[in-house]
Amino acid sequence: MTQRLDARLDRYAPAALSVFRIIFGLLFLFHGLSTIVGWPIAPGGGTASVGAWPNWYAGIIELVLGTLITVGLFTRIAAFIACGEMAFAYFYQHIEVSFWPIVNHGELAVALCFGFLLLVFTGGGAYAVDAVRGRR
């Protein structure tokens, strides 16, 4: 029974991977937008001042990489850098409170880090600019 279910679901895996990539890319993009320009809502302390370490730089990275990951352009390298940024964010910002993500509110950083790590190894899926570029 599970073999039939696996066979039916396997054909949708490339599309599901693309949806996963788009959602994670948009989460990253909107986090960068809120940090840099305060849209759709500014984070607790307001937007990051130009050049403020590390928030402004992180916001710029999130804007650029979030856009690349969302459209699926240079997905693997963009996801690799994004994974590293999220690991840095966890160990720079959250670890001071506690090691455990549930205590230090670092669940999003951990989830994004490992989601991007998955994209490093799987690529962007069937509906990515990378897939179109690869066919040429």
Image (spheres, helix red, strand yellow):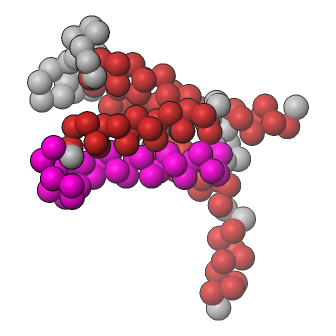
Q: Which residues are magenta?
A: 96-123
Q: Quadrant of the N terminus?
A: bottom right
Left or right, 118 with reference to 58:
right
Left or right, 64 with reference to 99:
right
Which residue: 72% across, 76% down? Answer: 7
Looking at this rendering, what residue extends furthest in the bottom direction? Answer: 1
- Majority secondary structure of the magenta segment? helix
What percent of the width, then of the height, locates residue 8? 69, 74
Which residue: 28% across, 9% down? Answer: 51
* Front position in the image: 131 or 11: 131
Which residue: 69% across, 84% down? Answer: 4
Is 101 a magenta residue?
yes
Q: Across the whole image, how many numbered discs are drawn on residues?
A: 0
Where residue 39 sits, quadrant-wise, is top left
Looking at this rendering, what residue extends furthest in the right direction? Answer: 136
Is 67 a magenta residue?
no
The relative height of residue 49 versus residue 55 in the rendered view (above or below) is: above
What percent of the width, then of the height, locates residue 108? 30, 48
What percent of the width, then of the height, locates residue 37? 28, 16
Q: Quadrant of the C terminus?
A: top right
The relative height of residue 97 versus residue 129 in the rendered view (above or below) is: below
What percent of the width, then of the height, locates residue 100? 21, 58
Where residue 101 sits, quadrant-wise, is bottom left
The relative height of residue 55 versus residue 103 in the rendered view (above or below) is: above
Q: Is residue 98 visible?
A: yes
Which residue: 32% across, 31% down? Answer: 31
Q: Is residue 28 visible?
A: no
Left or right, 123 with reference to 22:
right
